[in-house]
């Protein structure tokens, strides 16, 4: 989805940036993990296939993808952006007749021990305020207890269980009362132009001449 191709979202602990070709090698490295393949119900892909997938996600009108960066690392321009990557967020518009419904996928690959609620907050609120999403669904493996518990803290409720795929579908409908109860004040979430922010990180350091 090109709507977010120059959008940077800055939360309390993470920074979200559009998924671009520079991120693919690190992402592919993650997805070679059998554990992540199982947790995300993904099939292993070649690096070339991963690049094709990235282009598809960028072009398709029903997918909005962000890469999650560790904010503390990203604040240090000496650390390449790829080394700041900790996961990704996918927002899928699953019903053409209902643009207010989306399936949310969040994969955390390199941020163990973090507060997952803080990681989820930024893409969740972006979906509500910028994409007009009011109903969310998530599909989670039945053995992924941590993720199930996390989404239930966001007031997601069980919709169905698939014994065949060994996954549970959780859902929530967003309203103003729920937003205030779960998130409170969201003034900390900033939106900036990704291209300018990226270029400023890569600009060479010029020592101050006295």
Image (tube, helix red, strand yellow):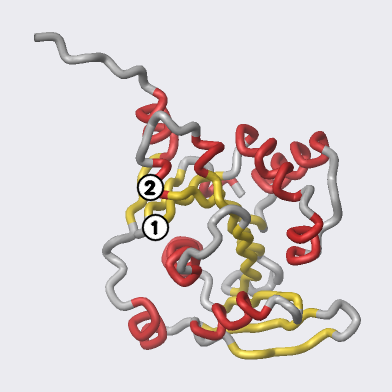
Residue 43 left/right relative to 168: right
Tag 2 secondary structure: helix
Instruction: Write the residue at 77% across / 52% down.
Output: 33
Alpha-carbon span between mark 2 and mark 1: 7 Å
Q: Quadrant of residue 126?
A: bottom left
> In the figure, 64 relative to 168: above or below?
above
Farthest top residue in view? 210
Residue 31 left/right relative to 188: right
> In the figure, 135 relative to 30: above or below?
below
- Residue 26 visible: yes
Instruction: Tell me the tag on residue 13.
Output: 1
Instruction: Write the residue at 35% across / 17% down.
Output: 204
Residue 25 percent coordinates (x, y)? 69, 36
Instruction: Tell me the tag on residue 72.
Output: 2
Instruction: Tell me the tag on residue 155.
Output: none
Residue 128 percent coordinates (x, y)? 46, 69
Q: In this view of the protein, which residue sits in the foreground, 172 or 133?
A: 172
Residue 123 percent coordinates (x, y)? 49, 62
Instruction: Write the residue at 64% across / 34% down.
Output: 21
Residue 103 left/right relative to 165: left
Q: How many marks?
A: 2
Farthest front residue in view? 113
């Amino acid at each position: 989805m090109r709507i977010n191709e120059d959008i940077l979202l800055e939360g309390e602990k993470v920074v979200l940036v559009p998924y671009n070709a520079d991120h693919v090698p690190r992402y592919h490295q993650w997805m070679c993990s059998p554990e992540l393949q199982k947790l995300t119900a993904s099939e292993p892909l070649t690096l070339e296939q991963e690049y094709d997938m990235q282009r598809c996600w960028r072009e398709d009108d029903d997918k909005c993808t962000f890469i999650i960066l560790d904010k503390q690392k990203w604040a240090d321009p000496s650390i390449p952006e790829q080394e700041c990557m900790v996961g990704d967020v996918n927002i899928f518009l699953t019903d053409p007749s209902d643009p207010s419904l989306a399936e949310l996928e969040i994969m955390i690959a390199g941020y163990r021990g973090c507060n997952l609620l803080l990681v989820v907050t930024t893409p969740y609120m972006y979906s509500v305020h910028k994409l007009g999403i009011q109903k969310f669904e998530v599909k989670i493996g039945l053995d992924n207890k941590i993720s199930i518990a996390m989404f239930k803290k966001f007031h997601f409720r069980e919709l169905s269980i698939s014994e065949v795929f060994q996954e549970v579908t959780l859902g929530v409908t967003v309203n103003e009362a729920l937003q205030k109860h779960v998130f409170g004040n969201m003034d900390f979430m900033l939106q900036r132009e990704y291209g300018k922010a990226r270029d400023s990180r890569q600009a060479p350091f010029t020592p101050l001449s006295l």
